[in-house]
Image (cartoon, rainbow, N blue to C red):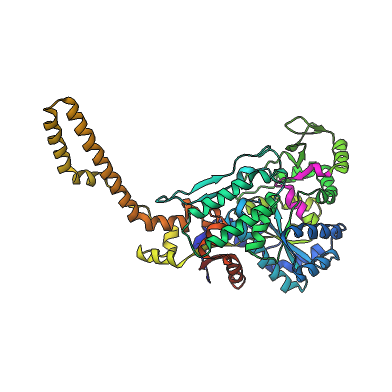
Amino acid sequence: MKVEAFDALYASTSPMIQIDHGYGRWLDYRGKDEIEKRAEEVSGRTYEHLPELVEIIKGQQEQFGELSEELEANLELLAQRKAYVMVTGQQVGIYGGPLFAVYKLLAVIKRAKQAEAKLGKPVLPVFWMATEDHDFAEINHVFTTQAFSRTLKKDALSSLPLAGKASVGDLEFERVKLELVQMAQRLLLNETETPYTSHLYHELIDLIQASRSFAHFFGGMMRRFVGSDFLLFDPHAKDVRALERPMFRRLIEHHEALHEALGHAYEEGMPSVELNKDAAHLFYHDGTRELLTKVDDVFTTKRGHRFTEDELLTEIEAHPERFSNNVVSRPLMQDFLFPTLGYVAGPGEIAYWLQLRPLFHEMGWKMPLLLPRLGALIVSRNDEKKLRQESVTLEEYMKQPLPDHAFDDEAFEEKLYAYRTLTEAVSHEAGKQGRRFEAKSRHVLERLADEMRAESKREQYRLNARRIHLSTRLFPMDAPQERILSMVPMLNRHGLDVFQRLKQAYEQSDAERCLFYV
C-alpha cells in the first residue's frame, strides 16, 4: 500500500485544514507540539475515580476479546495516574458506520503513539461510542451500489420501539439481527465478487450473531477489522453514570455561568454551527430521552417533568443512570472522566468545539488539544486505469468529476427517420382493411421503436460504465468517499486486512489528508 498527501480531498476553508492555521485564537493548545503543556495541566488535576473507571473499562473490553498485555499494563498505569488518554468518538453505526469512523480511530491511535513517544509515558487511545445518542436514523443504514447508476441506494433497518426517542444503548438489538443478515447479503450481492467475499460474509454473520447491542456490533467490527491496540468505551452504562454523578451536579450548579459563557462564545470567523444555548445540557431518561431546559428557576422537559435545582440534584444523587450528556456537556464529561490530552475530531465537531473553550474555563480547566481526524481516499489499480482511460488525473477528477455522456434524443430520432416513414406507410396500408388494423400496426411499430430507444440507452449506459464506476468508487453521490461508504465494500474489494494495512501506512506518513493506493 502506497500513501501520499492529498490536500485536494478538502477545500482550503475546511475546518480539517483551518484547525492548523486559522483557529488558533480559540484554542488553549495549538497543535500536537504543545502536548507537554497539556500533559502538565492534566497532571495537576485529580481523578479519584480512575481506579473504578479502569475496572469498568476492563469489563467492557471483555465482550470484544482479550486485551494485549501492553494495553492491560497501561490500564494499570492509568489507574495509578501514570498514563494519559487520547480520545475520539462517534455514533455506533451499523457495519462500522461511514468510513470516517474508522479514520477517527486510526487517527487517535496514531496521535496516542506520537504523544507517548514525546512524553515517555503511556497514552491510551479511547474510542467513545456514542451510545447515549438517540438519533437512530443516523446509525440504521448503509449505502449500496446499483447497476448503471451513480446514485447509491440507502438500505435502512426497520424502526424499533422508541427509536429516535430513547438512547441507542437502550434499543433492542435482537429484533434487527435477521434484517442485518439480509442487509449483508444485499451489500455483497451488489458488489463484484472477489476472493474475499465468502470469508467476509461469514465473518459478518458471526459478528451479528455474537452481538448483544448496537455498540457491541460496532465495536466488534472495529476489533475484528482494525485491530486491538485501542479501548472501546461505552458511556451508557449504569456504573459509568455513577462515576459521572459529581460532574452532573456541577453542570446543574454552574448552569447560569455555563449558559452565560456559551451565549457569548461565538465570535466572527468561527465556522457556523447550531448549538442549543438555552438547554441545561443534560438529558433526563424516563423511558425516553428528554432534554432538560431551565425556565423560571425550574428545570423542565417537553413531556412535563419539572425539577427545582434541589430536586434535580437529589435525583442525580439517587439515580445518576437517569441522566446523560448532550453535545455540549459530553466534551466536558470526557475531560472529567479521563486525563485527556486531546480529542480527534471531524469537521462538524471542530466547528462546535471552538465555542466550548469558555465552558472548560468555567470548570477551572483548559480545553484539550483539538486534533483533526484522518481524511483519506482509497484508490485501487482499477480506479487508476479508468482515470487514465478518461485522460484525467485524480486531482482533476476530485475537483471536477466527469458527467455521464448525455443521450442525444435528436440524433436518435434522425436515425429513426426511415423507420418512421415505414411506420406511416404500413399503417396506411393496414388502414385499408379497417381502423383497428391501422391502430394495431401503429401500436406494434411504436412499441418496437420504444424498445430500440431503450436498447440504445442501455448501450449509452454501457459507454458510461467507466464514469459511473469512478463516481461510485471515488466520489459517491458527489460527497467524499468517507462520508458515504461503509467498511464492507472496502473489505470486499481490497481484503479483510485492508484497514490494518491502512493503519500501518498512515502511521508512517506525516500527512493528515492521505491518498491510499491499494
Which percent across, then down, holds residue 8?
A: 49, 62
Q: Main structural element of the magenta stretch: helix, strand or loop?
A: helix
Q: Is residue 264 magenta?
A: no
Number of numbered discs visible in the structure rendering:
0
Q: Is residue 18 left or right of residue 465?
A: right
Q: Is residue 132 left or right of residue 455?
A: right
Q: Tell me: residue 514, above or below residue 454.
A: below
Q: Tell me: residue 294, above or below residue 216.
A: above
Judge by depth and name the residue closer to the eye, 344 or 202: 202
> Which residues are drawn in magenta?
320-334
- Quadrant of residue 225 within the rendered picture: bottom right
Q: Is residue 502 visible?
A: yes
Which percent across, then down, holds residue 89?
A: 68, 55
Q: Tell me: residue 80, above or below residue 166.
A: below
Judge by depth and name the residue closer to the eye, 6 or 199: 199
The residue under the point 72% across, 45% down is: 326
Q: Is residue 325 magenta?
A: yes
Which percent across, then down, holds residue 144?
A: 50, 51
Q: Is residue 354 visible?
A: no
- Quadrant of residue 112 within the rendered picture: bottom right
Judge by depth and name the residue closer to the eye, 504 or 119: 504
Which percent across, then down, holds residue 227?
A: 66, 65
